[in-house]
Image (cartoon, helix red, strand yellow):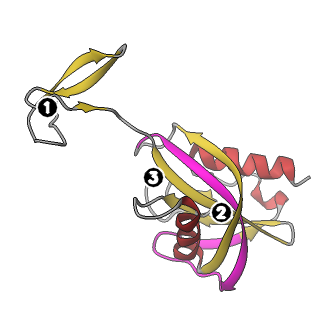
Amino acid sequence: MVHFCQQCGSVTDRREIGGREREVCQRCGTVYYPQWKVSAGVRVVENGSLLLVQRGIDPWRGSWHMPAGYVEVDEEPRAAAEREALEETGLVVRAGRLVDCYADTSDPRGKVLILLYEASILDGALSPSAETPSVRFFSRDEIAGLPLAGMSARLEIEDWLNTEK
């Protein structure tokens, strides 16, 4: 497979740099350093139940996770988490305390770091979207056996189940 430089468009080749194989432009010398994708999400709990959304798109179509998505280059992670919550659930939320940062190496789109924030509902009503055909709160017992959307969803939900005892 041929790869091309992101700076000048010339062909790259593989060379060892700093003890790792890297893509290097044959013309301008630009070195490509693969990076993690950054995502942000919210943990919303109401009356002891956890808000989850069902994925309507691949990967993991039909599986469940907390509202989350990629952080755009022009926004802060908390703002991205609030935006994603609105897009995926119809709820206006305020992201509060950072719960944790989860590393997900199971995503076929690339390695992802997920910043998960506690969040409270300010306004809106639960409403599905094309991206999330089902949106609802689950009790602790209802979560058992749900298909989960990858490694991060499993870790985030396990953490909530372990801290909410």
Q: Is residue 153 left or right of residue 24?
A: right
Residue at image mark 2: 42
Q: Is residue 71 visible?
A: yes
Marks 1 and 2, how far apart at CA: 39 Å
Q: In the rendered structure, find residue 59 and report the number of the disc placed on it.
A: 3
Residue 129 on the magenta segment: yes
User: Residue 43's x, y, as percent?
Assistant: 70, 62
28, above or below 16, in the image: below
For the point 51% across and 75% down, the residue is 87
Residue 129 image label: none
Q: Secondary structure at mark 3?
A: loop
Mark sitting earlier along the chain (2/3) = 2
Residue 155 screen position, x and y as percent: 68, 44
Could you tell me the amino acid type at mark 1? Val
Q: Report the residue marked by disc 1.
A: 2
SS assignment at label 2 = strand
Q: Check the image and report above or below for 116 versus 108.
A: below
Left or right: residue 143 versus residue 104 is right
SS under mark 1 = loop
Q: Residues within 10 Å of mark 2 (few under 14, many from 20)?
A: many
Q: Which residues are magenta?
A: 110-136
* For residue 3, above or below residue 92: above
Q: Of the residues under marks 3 and 1, which one precedes in the sequence?
A: 1
Q: Residue at x 42, y 61 (%)?
A: 72
